[in-house]
Image (cartoon, rainbow, N blue to C red):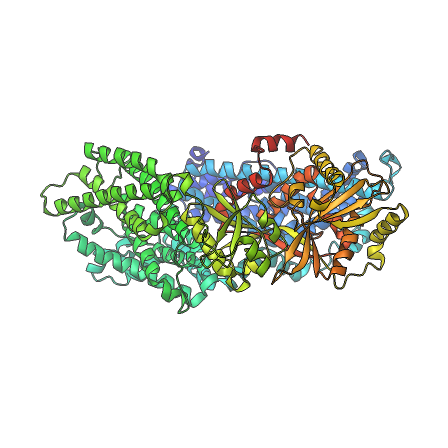
Amino acid sequence: MDQWLAAIPPIAVLLVVFGFVSVESIGVPLPGETVLVAATLLSLDGTISPWAIGATAAVGAIVGDSIGYLIGRRFGSRLLIIGARRFPARFNAQSIHSAIGIMNRWGIYAVVAGRFIALLRILIGPLAGTLRMPYRRFLAANAIGSVLWAAMVTTVVFSLGTAAITLLHQFTWIALLVVVALTVVIAIVMVYRSRKARAAAGVSAGTSTDTAPELQMSDLFEEDGSLSPLAAAAGMESGTTGIAGVKAAFGVVLGPVGRVLRRTPFAATLLGIFVVAGLAAGALWDPLIHRPWYHDIAYGLPSFLDGHWWTLVTGTFFSQLPIHYAVILIGLIVAVGWAERQFGSLRTIGIFAGGQIVAVIGTTFFMLAARSFDSDWANHLATQYDVGPSGGMFACLAAVLGTVRAPWRLRLRFALFAYVAVSLIYIGTLADVEHFLGVVAVFVATPFIRGPKYRAGRPSSREWRILAFASLITLAVVEIVGTILPGDDATASATPGTSTWVDLVIDVVIIALIANGVRLGHRLPWVIAVILGVFNVLEFVGLAIYAFVAVDFPPSLFEAMTNSSLWIALLVILWLGRTAYRVPLRRSRRAIRQQQDARKTPLDILTSDGGGTLSWMTMWKENSYFVTADGESFVAYQRYAGVAVALGDPVGPAEKLPATISEFVEECERVGLAPCLFSVSDATLAAAPQGWTHLQVAEDTIIDLPTLEMTGKKWQAIRSSLNRAEREKITFRMTSLAEEPWAVASQVRAISEEWVGDKALPEMGFTLGGVDEALDPHVKTALALDETGTVQGFLSWLPVYGADDSIRGWTLDLMRRRSDGTFKPVMEFLIASSCLAFQEEGALFVSLSGAPLARADGDAAATGIDALLESLGTILEPLYGFQSLHNFKTKFNPRYERMSLLYRDETDLPKIALALTRAFLPGESLVGIAKLGLAR
């Protein structure tokens, strides 16, 4: 195609482009975009302007689409009538009216986007005319889409050359596939809704469509071409014509642009200047270094030595290569735009300008100093020029990462620093020096940027371990890549020497052996890492001295020197976080510390200070205990998969709750365990360490006893169970199971074992007790017995202690009914009778406990993790009935209190999920759980 176009004059090329694009837009399947691409390639030799080609294509698209619109408006209705006669069930007046309404509502988006998608650009004009989209709205949207399409194609082709053909081809067909997929989905939904509507209206599926009245032209349009009264009554055309329609079209398309301009004016202005300057200079499609005036606007040591200080400003708004524009545009949007949303426009201007000045001027002084050492690398960079706003852009990114919540703030800033440092050492361009200095400057100035109230938090032991582990892995990868694929700069070695390979093998092997131990906080791997780091730093110092005094410094030694230099940063991290590496290697010595000489036992603390609704579960034998240093508080936990899972709220004085959590967390991190607290109340969430996060895992159902009155319609089902029990002579007894005769206790155990045997999965543990726990003298058991003494069902109630050994409430644990029992509402009867008994004793509340992974009706999942837990609850519902149990408890009109999982950050969630699975289903493998779940 381009060879054929090359044989004709430039004016003829423009006519060919106009003809092909316009005829294609009318509805004829011609390769209009292919002709545009070929013509743009011809402009690379300068015989014709790419701007003229793009403008011609845009005009051709507008003209062709307008003609196609008129054809569709004139003849398209006849095609609809023919379709209605052939397919009356689909092409009826109602469906066509709906299509017209959709075109008027969403047609602007379709017209703009259709210009970029194969086949749709051929059909969009006739389709809009057929469905009577107002022409002024169509013209406005079509003009926007045509100009954007022509500008994009010519710019991409002119910048990338022949490689753009493949890129555009893939883009347009991928977009078409996406549209087809969306169309299929929409069609399925519409068919489903249509059938559902017909079924609701009582329309039989077998009704013949032949009896439906035939669609007439008058059902759609009047003689003058306007919509029929039926269509007009549907509101298809109201408020969409005239100047208002044109304004609406531009408002829909350009509205988001206005919102961005209002929220981030500096970022938008900077972006606009950068793009306009690139267009004016032709740098978007041709490297700026080809311009004769490049050295007059570019900054660098030569410019400043020549007295061109204005280049500090002029060089900011250009980029050297066309491909750089795409990268920098994205960077400006993300870094500067995000910073402006966080800091405001004035502070963002200061950060960007300050970072750019420090990056450019700092690099200049660095080159002056480095050049005095007669380094080939420094001498090479001292002659280079550079342009671009990347120094300020990286400064904004470094600043805005400081606003991210802990611990991601430290991790992301560490990743940014690692990137600029590795780029400086192993790539070493002028831009890499600028990026490094811009980032470091912001890190140093962070307290001034964040304000006088800013206080940098000290990393936890876990964060020090993660940083050291990430540094070790980064070092290994960088050394491997740097040795195998050396750089092509002036100082790189073409063939790594023997000493470099030896250093590489030693470092990588040792890192592979100690990295996981460092992550877990073991002392010995930390010591080995420090020793290895010291040796590398000594090697760096020795090579640096040798490079300073040697006449001829081999390039291979320079590679070894650069590899060793990275160990300086790692050694600093290892030394600053040295207190984080105290975890013994032997498992027997990794238990959480307990106060063996404590004056109070956990039971003493619980009965004297009280606890939450799950507090009695902390007394179960599966738990271990962490007791605080003062012996006044404790945390009950179970250990699974390297996680210390605390059960419920910490127990102890309320004012010491934050200190208790902090001590528990510090002890867990000391021994290399990930801490989390399961099913905690809002009071514990408020006392959590800074930066911790949480998600809701259940809802506690509370019945307040002082105001309990089982009256009204809401309690009708409960009153019915009490009345039926009286008629059928079912008696209620609140007792201690340990004091019951063997005949009763054996029935209770048999009912429980039968219930467990009927389940596909084993009985849940952790927050659900069994008969053994019900035998505790502190626990009460509610029995429902018939006239023969047969146990129809039972409940176990756990005490909730208040201060001074008083019981302020009770928590429901076991609920079991006889499978062949004759009294069906036994659970309602037992719970209601228990509430009345506890009310008479003076208890303040009963907790029906929380069903895991269940919520009250109407509660929406707030996050993606919440949605995942909701889906998991749905999967497990047939096995354990979490939601069914939760719905059953609503009969008692309770109030709800959320129960949450408290954890450090999202990186702990996978291991916490594994730990909770093992806690709830002890002895069951994950494979077994998956098989049972799939076989439900």
Q: Which percent across, then down, holds residue 521?
A: 38, 45
The residue shown at (15%, 38%) is 554
Q: In which quarter of the image is residue 684?
A: bottom right
Q: In this view, does 818 lie above or below 721?
A: above
Residue 227, percent from left and from top? 77, 52
Comparing 452 with 195, the one in front is: 452
> On the picture, is 822 further left or further right than 655?
right
Depth order, front residue of 930/103: 930
Residue closest to the far right: 727
- Image coords of residue 120 (percent x, y): 61, 41
Quarter of the figure that contains the C terminus: top right
Which residue: 56% across, 56% down? 604
The answer to whether one can see residue 283 in this image is: no
For this view, does 366 lie left or right of residue 676?
A: left
Rendered residue at 55%/37% (across/down): 174
Seen from the viewer's position, the closer of residues 710 and 423 is 710
